Every structure is written in structure tokens, then in C-alpha cells.
Image (cartoon, grey):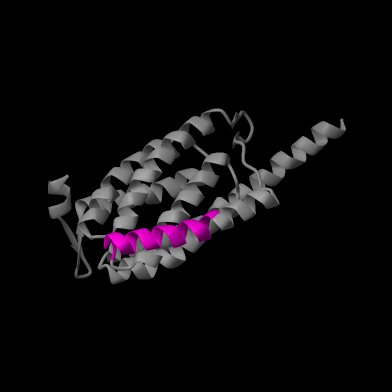
Amino acid sequence: MDFLLHHGITVLGQWISIAELAGQVFALAVVFLAQRRTLWTWPVQVGATVLLFAVYVSAHLGGLAARQVAILAISVYGWWAWTRRQDPVFGVVVRKGRLAERLAMLGAFAVGTTVMALVLDALHASWAPWPDAAIFVGTLVAFGAQGLGLVEFWLVWLAVDAIGVPLQISSGLYFSAAIYIVFAGLVVHGWWSWNRSAERVAGRQVTAASS
């Protein structure tokens, strides 16, 4: 891993380590795969977390580094959950969250961000504890909702991207910032794709119930 962190390429005058390049490309692939609801989403995510953990530790971003550990655990759960939610027609079955689930996501994001920011600040683990914490908690909420097959997880990712781009730029991680911008476009498309799939599944369930 030390080799991957200290060797890289220069793009438009900005040096990018192999670890950051590969980790962000893997993370980008995860969004692409998630749109298609394929089980490959999760093993690719595992590879991204290992690489990006090393990148963020070296950049002194404790929240972003800690988030990779949590993502690894959620990825294992998501992999298991998606294998149990396969459908021969629709692939992984997805749905829109209920009001209580949406409120729970918002509450977890708000409370979690506050607690994590205070912890990071107390431990001097991040130079930007509040956005660092928001990205950390938002990522956990998004991946948790993704594992459950909730369409709203894409909207949480949009919030994470909006916070993440300026933080990555301020940290000198310009390639990662550019990847976050690409993420935003893929996230919008992913939300549209999952929303259509959820509506088709709901329609089929209504038809089956009335017949």
C-alpha cells in the first residue's frame, strides 16, 4: 500500500497517487453498478474502501478514513441482503421508502453528523470536522438505505457530493473532487432508474393483489 500512496501520475499539473486514482475509479464503478442493481456493486466497493482508507489517513481526514471501515461492514451486509432480494424480471427489487423511513434517515443524518463532528474535533482527527462528519454519516445512511433497496439513498448521495466537492478541493485531492462531480451526474441518473423500477414493482404488486 505504501507503494500505491507514493507513486502516481500528474494530470493538469496535479499529482494523483495510484491509491487515490484506483480507489476513486472503483468508487465510480460502484455507482455505475448500483444503477444496474448488480451484485458486483458490493465486491467492487470493498476494493474501493481499502484503497481510500489509506488515502484519507495520509490526508489527515479522520472522518473520511473511518467511513471506509464502516462502508466495508455495510458492504458485507448489502451483498448478503441483495442476494435475498433477487427477482427474475427486475433484478434486485427496490422500493420507495415509507414516511417513517425517510424521517429516520433525516434524523440519523442530523444527529449522527453532530455527534461525529464533536468527536472528530475533540480528537483533533480532522481539520474540517463538520463537513468531514457530514460526509461520514451521510455515506453510512446512503449505504444502509441502498442495502435495504430504498430509492431515497440516491438523494442522500447528492447531499454527500455537495459537501464533498469543496472539502476535497480544500484538501488538495483534486482528482477526488472531480470524481465527486461525476458522481453527481450518475446519482441523478441512478435515482431516475431506481424510481422507475420501484414504480414497476409497485404496479405489479397492485395488479397481483387485485387479481
How far across and how far down the image is residue 189, in percent?
A: 55, 55
What secondary structure is the stretch in magenta mostly built from?
helix
Give 58 or 133, whichever is nearer the viewer.
133
Residue beneath the point at 26% across and 46% down: 51
Q: Is residue 86 above or below residue 50?
A: above
Instruction: Name the side, left or right, on which 153 lies relative to 162.
Output: right
Give 104 or 163, whichever is nearer the viewer.
104
How far across and how far down the image is residue 29, in percent?
A: 40, 47
| Residue 98 visible, this orientation | yes
Instruction: Name the side, left or right, on which 38 lies relative to 73.
Output: right
Which residues are the magenta region?
108-126
Q: Quadrant of the C terminus?
A: top right
Residue beneath the point at 38% across and 62% down: 118
Give 98 or 25, whichever is nearer the viewer.
98
How far across and how far down the image is residue 72, in percent?
A: 37, 40
How far across and how far down the image is residue 65, in percent?
A: 30, 52
Q: Quadrant of the N terminus?
A: top left
Examine the structure image and report whether residue 114 is included in the region drawn in magenta: yes
Find residue 55 and report its image quarter.
Answer: bottom left
Residue beneath the point at 87% across and 34% down: 210
Residue beneath the point at 36% across and 58% down: 119
| Residue 39 visible, this orientation | no
Q: How many marks?
A: 0
